[in-house]
Image (cartoon, grey):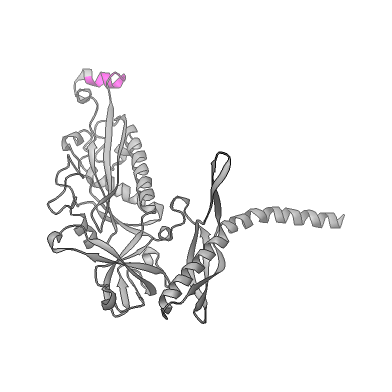
Amino acid sequence: MRWFITQFVRLLFLCALAPLMMAASAQAVVLEGVGHASIHNDDLASARAEARNAAMRDLALQYEAQVSTSDTMENGVLTESSMRLASSARARNVKVIDEHRSGNLLRVTVRGDISAGSASCGGAESGRLKKRVAVTGFPILYPDQARVGRIDDAGEILPQHLQQGLRESGNLQVFSATTSRLFPDLLNAPTIQKNDNRLTNVIQLAREMGVQFVVTGVIRDIGVADPAAWGSSVLDRMQRSIGAADMRRRFAVDVVVLDGFSGSPIYQQRFETAADWNAGPGSSSGFGSEGFRKTQYGEAVAGVVGDMAQVVTDALACQPFMARVTRVDGQLVTLDSGATAGLRPGDELHLYRSARYFDSLGGTPELSDSQINVTLNNVHPDFSNGRMPQVGGQVNIQRDDIAIIW
């Protein structure tokens, strides 16, 4: 009997422990990966980078791998067969724990915390980093529409609510620029270009604020369906009280996400809704007031702003992480992003040259692959520095070039 009770208690303990073990397995696990590379022309730095990348792939495939096959049949005969091996794992705190050279063969062993990556981005390394985003003001196309309910502050309060939603996602560093207005022509924004082929002055704003992306927009419509329904006569009030008046109010906003390095739009969408404007006289005194939030219209707008935040977060999730080079001293490279963005010692970023030409100095800078990586050694909250295998002057890496993690 005692043996039975002991086994029964053990079974209960295992049943209680099983969910915890499953939850733990979904979190990061520590694994080691091994990669090999051949050394050509005594170029140890390139071989080391290649072997480390191979070790990283080994780490990811150990944690989680998907195998897909594709067969082509013609007249019942197999003419082509292919297999694809992929992983959506994500690695953090990766360190090189061993390096061994045997002749022209280099072996590198790394250790890191491996967890499930983002399926939508295929486990992109940039998904673990927090990109910097600035949110500007959303000017109202027709300001007269804001008179009903005195919501003329919508151009500043709406982007503030959007900022809060973006911060709550935890994947972005969000900066406020709600007093800035990017588009001089609201009716055609953002399709009208300036003489220098830039859509707006977004490049200047992004550089001043040190951000990678700028989120902006235009409030297209906040008008009521029937302005006559809001009259002050006894008849108007009676019609509103019995539901005979059309009390609907429209809400339409264009949201645009712009790349801060080129000024080009990478995402654009219009959000629309409509609901009853059932605010009592004097109960609403602003777009963010309690009286506004309690209206059916305010609740509908809040839902749309939540959708906007989610869509912008998803649009930026698969974008590469980019940091500006602020200083080059020999082999030492300093970047304008650091620990607050998620960068860690040992991270490798690919360096791209940023070039402008005399016939288009105000145009979009062109990026060219330098075929050089920088490995971070020191990471501070807002900046970091590391070393590249060659002197900056030899490969023409200089201030204002770009470091990228894909």
Can you say which quadrant of the picture contains the C terminus? bottom left
Q: Position of residue 39 (x, y in %)?
A: 46, 77
Can you say which quadrant of the picture contains the N terminus? bottom right
Does residue 398 appear in this view? yes
- Overall secondary structure of the magenta stretch? helix
Q: Position of residue 223 (x, y in %)?
A: 22, 32
Along the line of sight, the residue nearer the viewer: 246 or 309: 309
The stretch drawn in magenta includes residue 196: no
Q: Position of residue 242 (x, y in %)?
A: 31, 19
**Which residue is located at x 21 percent, y 54 percent?**
202
Q: Is residue 97 above or below residue 179?
A: below
Q: Position of residue 58 (x, y in %)?
A: 54, 65
**Which residue is located at x 14 percent, y 43 percent?**
185
**Which residue is located at x 52 percent, y 60 percent?**
115
The span picked out in magenta is 236-244
Q: How many marks?
A: 0
Does residue 338 appear in this view? no
Along the line of sight, the residue nearer the viewer: 237 or 169: 169
- Left or right, 66 with respect to 378, comes to right
Q: Is residue 242 above or below residue 188?
A: above
